[in-house]
Amino acid sequence: MSNSRHLGIAVAQMGPVHLNDSRAAVVKRLVEMLNEAASRGAKLVVFPELALTTFFPRYWMTEEEAVERFFERSMPNKDVQPLFDAAKARGVGFYLGYAELTPSGERFNTSILVDANANIIGKYRKIHLPGHSDHKVDAPFQHLEKKFFEVGDVGIPVFEAFDTRVGMCLCNDRRWPETWRVMSLQSAEVGVLGYNTPSVNIHWNEPVHLRMSTHLVSLQASAYQNAMWIAAAAKCGSEDGHHMIGGSVIVAPTGEIVARAISEDDEVIVTSADLSWVENFRNHVFNFAKHRRPEHYKIIVERTGAGEPLPIPKI
Ligand code: CDT
């Protein structure tokens, strides 16, 4: 491409974090991966959702107990400071997911965007919370995101950073086309996310292989239809016997996977993302200003659940 603009993007996939692993031990792993990513040319490193702890929504407990064990009251805090120090020392930024307790006591499933000077320049709070809030005593494990977290209250913002525009989301958000369209309508060129996807779906007898294929098809279709780079970081493998899928990827605006993790462990994948591919598609097939017809999409914001067909116009 003649006008190529490159950004080194790394995805730092994490293997399991067990209940008894300390924050300090987890952050040490993150620092090691950040250093590797920097050595391999990355300027932005994507870590998983709820990266500092085990995927605790699988356990039934009170909200107070969850807060005490798994939420962060400030960011950066003492345990996480080494990651910020390493980012500054290496001149790279990062995306990190964690459980946020606000000063007024609200609980969010949150991600932050941190620049190469270790300043927090963006925050996102997860909107599409999956799972349930009741105790499913017959299920092999719980998925209590609806109990432990409130629906995010900051929309889907896009941040000017890394000489581009970056949008953030978290895990289940990636399955919803609205997430990516809201980013691309703000001219985001890069979308980043972390995820914890259990291999077993407790809600219905979903064939196990679909967990990986629906993950990948969501990211590939969204990257292409919105002409964006997407970088997705798993926390995966068996956390105290509870398995989660790997499959961390970097997807180009062509919809093609250009880098993919092969393990279910800590693993860094890197690509030099040519941002001009965004323009190639946005100037042509996905020239939104020229081709979108929002007057025919009103139902998308007028309805939440599916209902009756709209009246058919007389022609
Ligand atoms: N963490 C997260 O959002 N996980 C969901 C599981 C959905 S099944 C209840 C995901 O979309 O991967």
Image (tube, grey):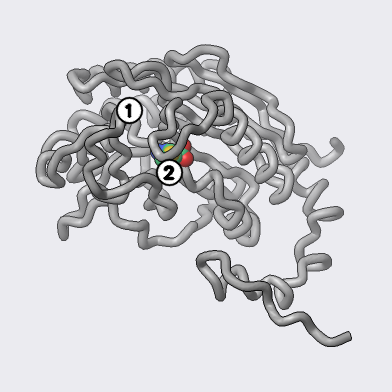
Q: For the residues marked 1 and 2, what is the alpha-carbon distance in whole angstroms? A: 13 Å
Q: Amino acid at mark 1?
A: Leu
Q: In the rendered view, does 133 fall on the left or right side of 167? A: left
Q: Which mark is residue 83?
A: 1
| Picture coordinates of residue 90, whole percent (x, y) | 44, 25
Where residue 194 sits, quadrant-wise, is top left
> Is residue 115 visible in the rendered structure shown here?
no
Q: Please identify the residue farthest to the bottom as the structure is shown.
A: 314
Q: Amino acid at mark 2?
A: Leu
What residue is pinned by disc 2? 113
Q: Which mark is residue 15?
A: none
| Picture coordinates of residue 222, whole percent (x, y) | 66, 45
| Picture coordinates of residue 30, whole percent (x, y) | 36, 22
User: Which residue occupies 21% across, 54% down?
Assistant: 102
Q: How many marks?
A: 2
Q: Secondary structure at mark 1?
A: helix
**Regarding ligand 1, which quadrant of the image does it lie in?**
top left
- The residue nearer to you, when weighing 40 against 123, is 123
Question: Vertical placement of 184 versus 2: above or below?
Answer: below
Question: Vertical placement of 296 versus 239: above or below?
Answer: below
